[in-house]
Image (spheres, helix red, strand yellow):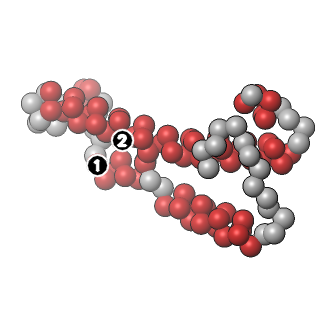
Amino acid sequence: MIMGNLLSPDLFCQAEFAKEIHALSSAAKPVATWFGVEALDEARKACGGHGYDTFLSLQVHRAQLLSIAYAEHTIIQWAVDAIREIDDPRIVQVPVKLQSV
């Protein structure tokens, strides 16, 4: 009943659902980037390992890929939220359908 959580008039339920979606999308981003890097590396190896041709527009460097997959603000944001939840006695854990966090 994912749409039921999304359309619920209860704002607390919507906030918990937003946390679930954020956790799932944050986990999917580095995994998708890793698969993309591996696919590009296989394409490079299939071309003899000599690198990417400019006409293919595959000019991706590993230094750029790390900044795509792992932004430094993600860890800081998670830590601030975790500390805020520990210190706030009003926050209660509510069971949600996805159970990813």
The spot of residue 62 in percent (x, y) is: 28, 49
In the rendered structure, the answer to whether residue 52 lies left or right of residue 65 reads left
Numbered badge on residue 10: none
In the rendered structure, the answer to whether residue 9 lies left or right of residue 21 reads right
Q: CA distance from mark 2 to mark 1?
A: 11 Å
Name the residue at 74% across, 28% down: 1
Judged from the image, the secondary structure of the residue bearing numbered disc 2 is helix
Residue lying furthest right = 9
Residue lying furthest front = 95
Name the residue at 70% across, 69% down: 86
Q: Earlier in the sequence, mark 2 or mark 1?
A: 2
Towards the viewer: 35 or 5: 5
Residue holding disc 2: 34
The spot of residue 22 in percent (x, y) is: 63, 45
Residue holding disc 1: 62
Q: Residues within 10 Å of mark 2 (few under 14, many from 20)?
A: some
Judged from the image, the secondary structure of the residue bearing numbered disc 1 is helix
The amino acid type found where label 1 is placed reads: Arg
In the rendered structure, the answer to whether residue 6 lies left or right of residue 79 reads right
Towards the viewer: 79 or 2: 2
In the rendered structure, the answer to whether residue 41 lies left or right of residue 83 reads left
**Res 59 quadrant in image:** top left
Residue lying furthest bottom = 87
The spot of residue 53 in percent (x, y) is: 20, 31
The amino acid type found where label 2 is placed reads: Trp
Q: Residues within 10 Å of mark 1 (few under 14, many from 20)?
A: few
Instruction: Judge depth for marks 2 and 1 and give the one in front.
Output: 2
Q: Are marks 2 and 1 in contact (CB under 8 Å)?
A: no
Q: Vertical placement of 11 versus 49: above or below?
A: below
Name the residue at 88% across, 42% down: 10
The spot of residue 47 in percent (x, y) is: 13, 27
